[in-house]
Image: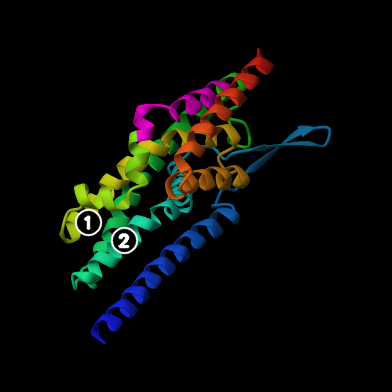
Amino acid sequence: MTAEWFLATLRYDRAVVLAGLCFVVLLAWTYLLLGAGMEMETMDMGGGQMMVMPPQWSPGYGLVVFVMWAVMMVAMMLPSAAPVTLLIASIALSRGSRRLGSTPMFVAGYLAVWFGFAAAATLLQWRLELAGMLSETMALASRVAAGVLLIAAGVYQWTPLKQACLRHCRSPFDFLLFHWREGAAGAFVSGVRHGAFCFGCCWMLMALLFVGGVMNLAWIGGIALLVLVEKVLPWGGLTGRATGAVMIAWGGFTLAAAL
């Protein structure tokens, strides 16, 4: 009877954690679908032609852009962290520590890494826009730059660093065995560690948002799906390398067409 109660409670807790993750991801995608607070300005070019332009940079607009990037990271990266998050929730219950908050602290640490990336991406977007290197869709205006970035991302898919980080992301049990720290603070640090491995695995894929357009939802969804497949499905590693080859070829064609 006790074992049955424990298994039922375990399933319930995992369902609650999974539902919470799905709810947060759904909110993030809803925010992006509603435009992420990015209101574009229009300029009359004469002759009935209108040009869409991003607002002038200011502290307020910079905050809006940062929030956009941060929410985008939640939408794209949190689903792939679900396996290790559910494992942590199961371990916490088995140790009788349901209410110690290790699971949310782990998620907070994980997202802290990606919020740091969001801050860096905001600064990069600011500099690119000031240099006139972004189009009105917040994509690289230069096809040469886009081609070079595609090739660089494709090559990175084959590097030992990418593969090492991907192995950590694909092995929740191994990660917890070697990197887990007890307590709420330890869970946060463990989340940061896991986020660091995921960053090493995916940062070049995130940079490709500047190729397809920062607010191109189809592009965002495609990259998020690739990240999920790489980390969760059995053939994820092979998919990542195959995608890298496609990126290199795509970048080469883009460069050839631009030169």
Name the colour scheme: rainbow
Query: The disc labelled 2 sits on which kind of residue?
Result: Leu
In the depicted view, which residue is nearer to us: 131 or 6? 6
| Residue bounds of the magenta highlight | 147-163
Query: The disc labelled 1 sits on which kind of residue?
Result: Ala
Rendered image: mark on residue 187: 1
Say whether residue 156 is magenta. Answer: yes
Q: Secondary structure at mark 2?
A: helix
Say whether residue 8 is magenta. Answer: no
Which residue is found at the position 51% from the left and 47% from the top?
A: 224
In the depicted view, which residue is nearer to us: 11 or 119? 11
Which residue is found at the position 27% from the left and 47% from the top?
A: 192
The spot of residue 202 in percent (x, y) is 42, 38
Residue at the extreme bottom of the image, as rendered:
1
Q: Secondary structure at mark 1?
A: helix
Q: Is residue 64 visible?
A: no
Rendered image: mark on residue 87: 2
